Image (cartoon, grey):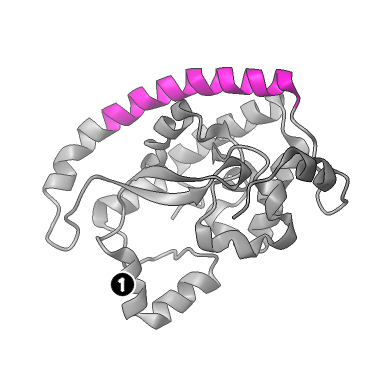
Amino acid sequence: MQRVSEEQEVALVSQPSVNYKPFSLFELGIKRLIDIIGGTVGTLLFLIAAFCLAIPYLMANEKDKGPMMYKQKRYGKNGKIFYIWKFRTMILNAEAYLDEHPEIKQAYHDNGNKLEDDPRVTKIGKFIRQHSIDELPQFLNVLKGEMSLVGPRPILLFEDKEYGERLSYLLMCKPGITGYWTTHGRSAVVFPERADLELHYLEIHGLSSDIRLLFMTIFQSFSGKDAY
């Protein structure tokens, strides 16, 4: 994946495929300040959650045993690849499981790389996913500057084809812990509609919209709606 240069960004903005609204320097500054404050608070919540989850992970049955956290490669701003951190919610070697069960793998890809009743999800993992607790370690990514509190979700390396020519737009900003797709259907909305919702953030971003999406995310994390 090639990085998006300033010249390419200017050229993309002039194209009609996405009604991209450029980020002002003021907006980027405020956004980073909010990220630092929110990332600090979120990291404290992550540490509390890690302490509380330590015993359930240690007492997991043989099938579900494994490390508490895992990292995964995702696309970041300008196409730079970084490692996203999460609480582990699946069995070890989850990708190998799909290779060994082609019918499940096909259903996984047909449903936008999601399964509502994924057989790889652990017992504690189901609860963690429902309430978005698995995303808490990403506040570390926010503090490092790899992610923002709000933005398009960082995509898996094999999902780039779902965006086609519009992928370069998606890579113009930092990915977020939450965003427009996350709060408007999430797992219930799959590609190609998901791509449309993720890119819509580039059209409506701003301080007020970011705050609104953050509050929607907090409500959603308690209700567990559309999360699996």
Quadrant location, the N terminus = bottom right
Residue 102 appears left or right of 153? left
Label 1 sits on what residue type?
A: Tyr
* Horizontal and vertical percent position of residue 126: 33, 53
Q: Is residue 206 above or below residue 155?
A: above
Q: Is residue 180 above or below residue 2?
A: above
Q: Can residue 11 be seen from the camera position used here?
A: yes
- For the point 60% across and 41% down, which residue is it? 77
Tell me which corner region of the image, top left, top right, bottom left or bottom right, holds residue 103: bottom left
* Horizontal and vertical percent position of residue 144: 45, 28
* Horizontal and vertical percent position of residue 173: 65, 38
* Horizontal and vertical percent position of residue 19: 83, 45
Camera-side residue of 207 and 2:
2
Q: Can residue 191 be seen from the camera position used here?
A: no
- For the point 54% across and 52% down, which residue is it? 155
Camera-side residue of 146 and 85:
146
Q: Residues within 10 Å of mark 1 (few under 14, many from 20)?
A: some
- For the point 15% across and 53% down, which residue is it? 60
Q: Is residue 4 above or below residue 112?
A: above
Residue 61 appears left or right of 136? left
Reply yes or no: does residue 190 show up in magenta.
no
Which residue is farthest bottom? Answer: 103
- Residue interval drawn in magenta: 24-49
Residue assigned mark 1? 97
Tell me which corner region of the image, top left, top right, bottom left or bottom right, holds residue 131: top left
Secondary-structure class at tag 1: helix
Quadrant location, the C terminus = bottom left
Tell me which corner region of the image, top left, top right, bottom left or bottom right, holds residue 188: bottom right
